[in-house]
Amino acid sequence: MAKQSTEGITVKKEEDISEWYEQVCLKGKLAEFSKVKGSIVIRPNGYAIWEKIQGYFNKNIIEKSGAENAYFPLFIPESFFHKEAEHAKGFSPEVAWIDKKLTGDGERLAIRPTSETIMYDSYSRWIRSYKDLPLRINQWCNVVRWETKATRLFLRSREFLWQEGHCVYETEKECDKETNWYINEYKRLAEELLAIPIIVGKKTDKEKFAGAKYTLTIEAFMPDGKALQCGTSHNLGQGFAKAFNINFEGKDRKSHLPWQNSWGLSTRLIGGMTMIHSDDKGLVLPPRIAKNKVAIIPILIKGKEEKVLKKAKEIQKSLKKYNTILDDDKDYSPGFKFNKYELEGIPLRIEIGPRDLEKNQIVLARRDTSEKQDIKIKNIEKSIKETLETMQKEMFDKAKKELTNKITKTNDIKEFKKIINNKQIALVPFCGRVECEEEIKDNTGASSRCYIDDKSTSEKCIKCGQEKAKWIYFSKSY
Amino acid sequence: MAKQSTEGITVKKEEDISEWYEQVCLKGKLAEFSKVKGSIVIRPNGYAIWEKIQGYFNKNIIEKSGAENAYFPLFIPESFFHKEAEHAKGFSPEVAWIDKKLTGDGERLAIRPTSETIMYDSYSRWIRSYKDLPLRINQWCNVVRWETKATRLFLRSREFLWQEGHCVYETEKECDKETNWYINEYKRLAEELLAIPIIVGKKTDKEKFAGAKYTLTIEAFMPDGKALQCGTSHNLGQGFAKAFNINFEGKDRKSHLPWQNSWGLSTRLIGGMTMIHSDDKGLVLPPRIAKNKVAIIPILIKGKEEKVLKKAKEIQKSLKKYNTILDDDKDYSPGFKFNKYELEGIPLRIEIGPRDLEKNQIVLARRDTSEKQDIKIKNIEKSIKETLETMQKEMFDKAKKELTNKITKTNDIKEFKKIINNKQIALVPFCGRVECEEEIKDNTGASSRCYIDDKSTSEKCIKCGQEKAKWIYFSKSY
């Protein structure tokens, strides 16, 4: 008999969220640290979540917007970066380079931290006429940013997986409209698939993407009050088009500069989802994102195994569309298995033993609430379907309520500091100037997350008192 | 009106296959050369083919075999390579390294040329007991091999996309069985999806994978008689397990070394498919791999546009499951559009004009044979379905016949040389020794492709005359 020692989570979420989070990821077999400093291994349980995100994304965002997937090189010539000055400045500290000796042509090659420059070089050849627009291309790939801060599973690693969409439009209006459309679809993905409540808004000048006109963001908030930027959509204006010589012949037969946007989200989302929903027993997965939605644990008592197993197999078959697991390993106790599937976040557990069988029922346990219910076997399919839907909804509602409770509106700087110290989120009037933002960061550790909208108000900036401030969220962040 | 200048293929396949192939890929918008030496851009038309391959593969190979997808780091510490001596020797000339200054810990990092070493480091921690076996993990990723030969779209580039599966088994027998299973599934994928006829067999010691016990391969043969290795499945024996300290507690409570295999196929397949099927008008896609299977070209004559367009739209709607394109751009002539979709390899074209409409019919044209047929509109769905099926089958049959015609069996060395010079494939008795193979390569330019089976025969080696030779294919190769 193999050793029965799958250890549970040994730290409470409330006591040490950082250590707790790491254990949830490791013991839920989502990911592990690699021997390569700064890199992580995404294990099958974690990668299955990424595949679900990809499936949803390709269907609801790529196809729906008329975008197409493609693949551009991992390597980017150094000279490409320098074509757009702000972009180069923004990324240069984080770029990993390939040894010049190898490249042989005197120019270093970057390992892509993002692909604007290499893609727009191609775009400059592909785009000739207004008939080629809008051009909407997305790629799923790995990117590398040479982080020096400590590696955190999914949240911060030198290599991560993401998608990056890059569109080109005839007019500013179209570009604006779709930059907004994409960020709102990101919100929908996070909320509907991952049950992560999202705040959408615009970044400040300090926080916007290097080279962008403006950046829209989806922000999630973790139980420790820290924000997690989960995806962004950038209106790039015409700067890259100018730098990369992208232009098109318009209906007027004249040459024009197009407008561009780019939008991306990454495996970071998996970390956010894990941190928001999981508990002291391990991973909790929203049903829609779970590959295996149900685990059946037969209670095997000597002499009565056969009948129970037969019924368990029948149930498994009837629940095939949920990728239902049947764990009939006789070497492990039911309790051991309960712990195992709780650690791995399987949404529903079915227990079935000889006594249940006599009553033509099973026990159905929900991972998120630990609620147990007796269900008649004849009602099982209906109950599973309904319970999964309820669970998805309730997980989102709970997280949404927690988020709402964390936000406090104030225009008083003392109150602001108290809010940040209490690991909450402050909604404050702000002038938008980089200097003010840097001072706030130095004094409180909080950074701006996003404006709630573009409206100037009668309020004064919480930092400098300048008038016509706009409401913005501040918090600590990952 | 935009410039009507999509140029067709300017070189004949028979005259200069190399230039012809490049034009087919470029003008079919499958891929282009990147400004980064050795790298290519896979454009949406090309990437859609890769996505179809991925979809088929995940369903028919990954799921069916009980494998799971995961993701391992791009970077591999140099020391990992040296753990398995033959493996290190085999790959060292091709590895791209990250600047030591950046890594900061005195060790260079390789950009993965293949992931055995980084994956097996994790496996050594994940595998404890026979209960953890078989372990079957696959990853879809980019790999880098620093080729010095000229770049060829899909066929040879420094970065390419592939999948690599890596399994661990308790017994040699299981490992053998599944190493064979995977290669046979590769054959099925190539033949059923891409209509590429395949020869399956075992590689010689010279050609096997660095560190493998043996390598199985699927070989396709191009119209110029050169072979293209399209996928491989390696039985790795126990060498990597030993090197990476992977062992498990067996049912007997003792520690054992497991057996391993790995199997991979790449975007190279797209190149092979393109070269086999395409013609002097451009790309020809087997229907099953084509994303857009039908293009409707309305013949728009002044005053009669509306009726034709209305019907064309109805037809498009009824053929939605084939991702049917309707090209109603009035700025381009039907002839221009015919050329365009022929260049891009759309399997079927529907022409519909006012006269067709009067007769309640359309013209259906097949991309591979240029055959045209009048089809009653009421029969259109049935006809499309049947024509696509017939086309898929006939494209495979044609390619299969061409392959069979290229193979000549001989045990005479003079005849052998003639066969190779005539751009054909020779089936010859061979001793299997590395020296003989190197001499043949030096004298004729041909390399061994694969044994037809494991049987020793009464024939003598075509090179050295050694007895008990085995039948093997020789040809030039990509």
Image (spheres, coloured by chain):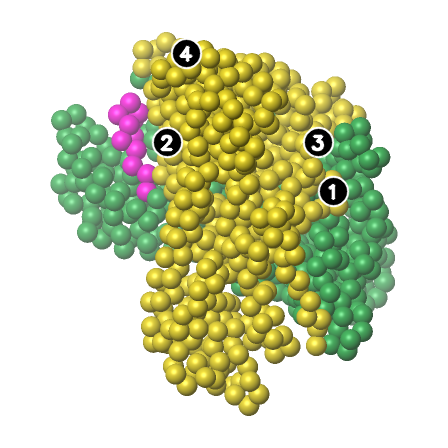
Chain colours: A green, B yellow
Amino acid on which the number 4 mark rests in the picture? Glu
- Say what secondary structure mark 2 lies in: helix
Is residue A333 magenta-colored? yes
At which x and y percent is residue A445? 75, 43
Q: From the image, which quarter does the N terminus of chain A lie in?
A: top left
Mark sitting on residue B181 = 2
Quarter of the rendering containing residue B322: bottom left
Which chain letter goes with mark 3? B
Q: Main secondary structure of the magenta part?
A: loop
Quarter of the rendering containing residue A393: bottom left
Q: Is residue B108 above or below residue A288?
A: above
Tell me the residue at 31%/15% (across/down).
B251
Which chain letter goes with mark 2? B
- Say what secondary structure mark 3 lies in: loop
Reading the image, the residue beneath label 1 is: B36
Judge by depth and name the residue closer to the eye, B477 or B316.
B477
Amino acid on which the number 2 mark rests in the picture? Trp
Discs 1 and 2 carry the same chain letter:
yes
Does the CB distance between marks 1 and 3 fall below 8 Å?
no
Does the CB distance between marks 4 and 3 fall below 8 Å?
no
Can residue B198 be seen in this snapshot? yes
Reading the image, the residue beneath label 4 is: B467
A33 vs A324, left or right, is: right
Quarter of the rendering containing residue A145: top right
Farthest top residue in view: B254
Amino acid on which the number 3 mark rests in the picture? Thr
At which x and y percent is residue B360? 38, 81
Judge by depth and name the residue closer to the eye, A73 or A8.
A73
Q: From the image, which quarter does the C terminus of chain A lie in?
A: top right
Q: What residue range appears in magenta?
A: A324-334
